[in-house]
């Protein structure tokens, strides 16, 4: 169902959150995505997509401690829930299945 | 050095983020951006690029959040844990109100269009009016010394002579004093002729006002008025552009004004048109050269008062000093009057339209008219919206029962009205600016060419917005306040109301009488203005004025002697009578309603001098003869030189005595014809025929009165005919054309041809021009007019007022029909049940019809009862603009009442018809 299907950006987001582990919050996610995709992605887009994923039950967020360099604002850390990991695996499988047999350039 | 400053993210971007985003997302996003900005971006990219990055993130993030909020709004299932929102997207925000308002307006397009149109008319009228006021009273003059410009006048309000100017110009406290007067003459340039308006000014005029010379040539310089200097003129930019097609070679070339040559020194800067708003001369010339243009050497002497004076103060606050110094100086030169010195930072008020401060001016009346029409519009819109809100009470009741508070409902209703008013404001503002342009050109007359700068500026924009918003609140507040207080239970339960309750309770019933009362005021005003025109036209009292033609003639090469001139004019007249379809033809030196010529008259045996009429505003009056006593001790009468045929052509009958004949030549004894007014004032009931008078400097009483002609209001249609005397053109030597003149030759005379066509045999302008050209190709015809056109011009102000009054009345009546119809129709629909019961109980359809019409007429009667006294009070405020009409004119009142009542019946007809067709069975079964 559509509920289970990941968009491309959501897929990348989930991967980034998994990769970052305990340090996954807005800025680090943004920087990781920017580094790997080579594109400047807005924090707003990240948070809105994460909010969507959270609503789908794929990720979970918690508030961290405020730090001085953030102007006293708390970080919002994310971690991927088991449902999220399943969704990543499913998306990965779809990608691999589709790519199988195609010559890599 | 500015690392500290550069390290902080852009404040505006942060502010934007905080405004646009909601709590949780806001703090997370701002925190992330700040952190990345400080720890990575500034060290890596430098402060500037980092700030750019921050801005980009801000904008992209806001876009992303707004988009997400939008998706969420469309998919309520997607309840978010992280509240990302935007204030524009809040469901209960202003945006939502406006969206729902737009939906509501689209649902009832007819009402919306009616509302917008009604308001747009009101806003347009007010914007147009304000544009004119702005141009006349608020805009600053485009000169450097505008804030220190003062007008210098006598308390009695007369003009000054040139010697008075010379004696006044170095008054302490004044940096400079300028003087000027206006005249009009024919200009000849490369054999083409054109009538131009000239302002004769002192040579320091441009310098004193602070007008900087443009790139084209020079302006007048202070020695241009010294004797012996070659005559020069400065063209206005508009005249140079329009008439000379901005030809730069005009500068330095020679033009002829009247019959004297002037060199074009330069072009005034674009936008400068003198100190009198709404009046723009074509060119300026030093006033010391005025005698060449006016053919009048005495105009610079002590007997010719024709100048207006403006001063430039040393300091803005030295008005009192100047006034005292002037008073002392005037006393020293024998001037009696008290000087009035006034700051005029915005230029002289527009003389005919702005009027005097004390009196009622047309401008004020028009302002009141536009205010009235806006009020009528507001009432009407209130009625329309009120009726509509009434219909929506079910919807409102449902919303209220679902938890919308009174404030919420009020806000939604106000938003709807705001939307309508905004649309109306935009439409009305645009229309108003267009109207202002038309109005400005209509307001100009021949003597005061209109040059009002009514262009749209910030002030007009602000005014339009203010008017629209006030209007919106006015119309919105009443129905909104009333209907936001819904009683959901009552409405949802009962669902219907009786006819009587609707009639009485709707609160609209005091709006309709209000509308009627204001409409009555407009109607009566229009009525008395139309009657004024009628009376003024009736006052002309000429038979078939449409058959009278005038042609202004300039005689370039005059016959060398007076005898030859006598032949010339006699031949010209004979030639004109050969024109087919002509009934009578004559020549004169003046033209009724146009040229004003006056001079001193003495009557043999008369010891007391009747009071003369004051000189009207216009071209400089002729000077008194040399050595004559001062003007005020003489009897100043209107005069003209005419040929035989002039009176028949004008349609003026002889009351007594005879008309001039060809026998009254230069060689014959001098004769004169007087009008009835002069005859009565000079001789009372005695017979004036055969009495002797003296004209001008002739001391002997050598002119014999041979006839008395009927009166004609020649100068001002509102005033009784002036004292007038006529001399034969052939005998002009006695007064007008002196054989020794400035140039030594016979001075040219401008003549007017007066023709009367036979009934049913009209001729054309071209025929007249051809006939004159065939007689002498060097004669130049300036203009050809009919008397009707001339009278129309003289009445242009009255006609404009009457037109505005009538148009606004028609609009008010149309709005009244719309309002009444709306209320009655709604009442009949809502009162179906009651109507059904009545029918079932035996009422006839006829009686129901009568009931509805009766209600309508009853409401109208209440309105009239308030409106008529209000009209009386209103009309009295502009009584000075009226002529031959009482503030309560029975005919006008009767017409007003019958018009309003007929309107009421008309508006009630369809609802009444519907009421009578209610099917009792259907009506009772409903609900």
Image (spheres, coloured by chain):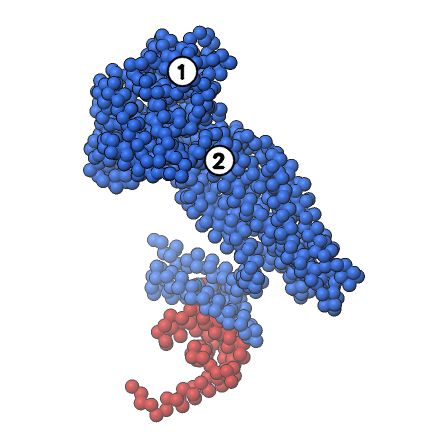
Chain colours: A red, B blue
Q: Name the residue under label 1.
A: B706
- On screen, residue B155 above or below B717: above
Q: Tell me the SS state at disc 2.
A: helix
- Number of callouts in the render? 2
The residue that disc 2 covers is: B798
Parent chain of label 1 = B
Spatial separation of the CA atoms under disc 1 and disc 2: 38 Å
Question: At 42% from the left edge and 79% from the top edge, which residue is drawn?
Answer: A8
**Picture coordinates of residue B113, whole percent (x, y):** 53, 57
Horizontal side of B842 relative to B100 (left or right) equals: right
Please say whether residue B453 is visible from this viewpoint: yes
Is B625 or A61 nearer to us in this picture? B625
Instruction: From the viewer's side, name the closer residue of A25 and B875.
Output: B875
Disc 2 residue crowd, few under 14, some 14–19, many 20+, Cα 10 Å: many
Query: Which residue does the image show at 51% across and 72% down from the upper left?
Result: B71
Q: Between label 1 and label 2, give the one nearer the viewer.
A: 1
**Does dot 1 land on a helix, a strand or a loop?**
strand
- Tell me what residue is drawn at x 70 percent, y 50 percent: B854
Q: In which quarter of the image is residue B890?
A: top right
């Amino acid at each position: 169902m559509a509920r289970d299907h990941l968009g491309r950006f959501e897929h990348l987001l989930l991967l980034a959150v998994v990769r970052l582990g305990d340090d996954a919050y807005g800025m680090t996610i943004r920087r990781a995505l920017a580094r790997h995709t080579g594109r400047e992605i807005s924090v707003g887009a990240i948070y809105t997509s994460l909010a969507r994923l959270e609503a789908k039950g794929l990720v979970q967020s918690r508030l961290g401690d405020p730090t001085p360099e953030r102007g006293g604002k708390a970080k919002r850390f994310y971690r991927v829930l088991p449902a999220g990991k399943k969704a990543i695996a499913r998306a990965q499988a779809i990608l691999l299945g589709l790519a199988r047999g195609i010559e890599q350039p | 050095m500015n690392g500290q400053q550069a390290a902080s993210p852009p404040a505006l971007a942060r502010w934007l983020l905080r405004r646009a985003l909601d709590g949780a997302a806001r703090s997370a996003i701002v925190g992330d951006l700040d952190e990345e900005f400080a720890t990575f971006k500034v060290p890596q990219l430098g402060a500037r690029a980092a700030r750019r990055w921050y801005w980009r993130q801000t904008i992209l993030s806001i876009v992303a959040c707004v988009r997400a909020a939008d998706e969420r709004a469309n998919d309520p299932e997607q309840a978010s844990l992280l509240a990302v929102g935007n204030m524009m997207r809040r469901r209960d925000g202003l945006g939502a109100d406006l969206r729902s308002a737009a939906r509501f307006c689209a649902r009832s397009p007819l009402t919306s269009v009616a509302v917008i149109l009604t308001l747009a008319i009101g806003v347009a009228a007010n914007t147009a009016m304000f544009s004119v006021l702005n141009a006349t009273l608020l805009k600053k003059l485009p000169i450097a010394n505008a804030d220190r410009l003062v007008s210098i006048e006598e308390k009695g309000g007369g003009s000054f002579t040139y010697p008075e100017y010379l004696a006044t110009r170095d008054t302490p406290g004044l940096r400079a004093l300028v003087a000027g007067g206006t005249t009009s003459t024919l200009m000849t340039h490369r054999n083409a002729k054109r009538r131009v308006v000239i302002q004769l000014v002192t040579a320091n005029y441009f310098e004193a006002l602070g007008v900087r010379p443009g790139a084209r040539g020079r302006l007048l310089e202070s020695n241009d008025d010294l004797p012996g200097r070659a005559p020069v003129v400065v063209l206005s930019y508009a005249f140079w552009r329009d008439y000379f097609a901005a030809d730069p070679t005009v500068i330095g070339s020679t033009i002829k004004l009247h019959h004297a040559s002037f060199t074009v020194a330069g072009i005034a800067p674009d936008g400068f048109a003198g100190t009198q708003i709404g009046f723009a001369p074509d060119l300026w010339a030093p006033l010391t050269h005025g005698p060449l243009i006016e053919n009048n050497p005495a105009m610079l002497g002590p007997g010719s008062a024709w100048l207006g004076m403006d001063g430039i103060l040393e300091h803005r606050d030295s008005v009192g000093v100047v006034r005292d110094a002037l008073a002392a100086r005037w006393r020293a030169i024998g001037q009696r009057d008290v000087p009035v010195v006034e700051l005029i930072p915005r230029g002289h008020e527009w003389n005919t339209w702005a009027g005097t401060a004390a009196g009622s001016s047309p401008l004020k009346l028009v302002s009141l008219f536009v205010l009235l029409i806006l009020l009528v519009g507001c009432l009407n819109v209130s009625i329309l919206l009120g009726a509509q809100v009434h219909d929506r009470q079910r919807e409102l009741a449902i919303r209220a029962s679902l938890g919308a508070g009174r404030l919420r409902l009020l806000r939604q209703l106000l938003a709807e009205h705001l939307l309508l008013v905004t649309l109306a404001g935009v439409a009305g503002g645009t229309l108003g600016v267009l109207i202002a342009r038309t109005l400005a050109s209509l307001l100009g007359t021949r003597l005061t060419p209109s040059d009002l700068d009514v262009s749209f500026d910030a002030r007009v924009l602000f005014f339009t917005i203010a008017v629209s918003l006030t209007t919106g609140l006015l119309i919105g507040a009443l129905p909104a306040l009333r209907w936001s207080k819904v009683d959901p239970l009552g409405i949802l339960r009962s669902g219907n109301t009786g006819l009587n309750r609707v009639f009485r309770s709707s609160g609209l019933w005091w709006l309709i009488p209000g509308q009627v009362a204001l409409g009555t005021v407009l109607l009566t005003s229009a009525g008395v203005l139309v009657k004024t025109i009628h009376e003024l036209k009736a006052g002309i009292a000429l038979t078939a004025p449409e058959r009278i033609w005038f042609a202004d003639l300039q005689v370039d090469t005059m016959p060398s002697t007076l005898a030859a001139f006598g032949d010339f004019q006699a031949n010209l007249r004979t030639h004109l009578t050969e024109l087919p379809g002509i009934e009578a033809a004559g020549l004169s030196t003046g033209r009724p309603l146009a040229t004003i010529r006056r001079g001193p008259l003495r009557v043999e045996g008369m010891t007391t001098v009747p009071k003369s009429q004051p000189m009207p505003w216009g071209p400089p009056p002729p000077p008194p003869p040399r050595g004559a006593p001062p003007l005020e001790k003489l009897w100043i009468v209107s005069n003209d030189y005419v040929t035989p045929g002039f009176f028949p052509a004008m349609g003026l009958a002889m009351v007594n005595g005879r008309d001039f004949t060809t026998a009254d030549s230069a060689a014959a004894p001098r004769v004169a014809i007087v009008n009835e007014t002069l005859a009565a004032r000079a001789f009372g009931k005695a017979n004036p025929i055969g009495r002797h008078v003296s004209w001008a400097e002739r001391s002997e009483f050598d002119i014999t009165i041979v006839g008395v002609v009927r009166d004609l209001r020649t100068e001002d249609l509102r005033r009784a005919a002036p004292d007038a005397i006529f001399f034969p053109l052939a005998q002009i030597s006695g007064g007008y054309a002196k054989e020794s003149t400035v140039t030594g030759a016979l001075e040219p005379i401008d003549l007017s041809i007066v023709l009367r066509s036979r009934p049913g045999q009209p001729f054309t302008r071209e025929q007249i021009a051809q006939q004159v050209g065939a007689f002498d190709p060097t004669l130049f015809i300036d203009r050809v007019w009919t008397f009707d056109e001339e009278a129309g011009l003289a009445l242009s102000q009255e006609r404009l007022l009457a037109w505005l009054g009538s148009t606004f009345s028609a609009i008010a009546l149309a709005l009244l029909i719309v309002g009444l119809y709306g209320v009655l129709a709604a009442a009949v629909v809502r009162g179906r049940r009651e109507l059904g019961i009545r029918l079932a109980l035996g009422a006839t359809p006829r009686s129901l019809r009568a009931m509805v019409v009766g209600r309508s007429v009853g409401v109208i009667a209440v309105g009239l009862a308030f409106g008529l006294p209000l009209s009386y009070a209103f009309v009295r405020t502009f009584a000075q603009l009226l002529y031959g009409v009482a503030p309560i004119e029975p005919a006008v009142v009767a017409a007003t009442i019958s018009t309003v009542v007929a309107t009421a019946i008309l508006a009630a007809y369809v609802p009444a018809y519907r009421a009578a067709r209610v099917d009792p069975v259907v009506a009772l079964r409903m609900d």
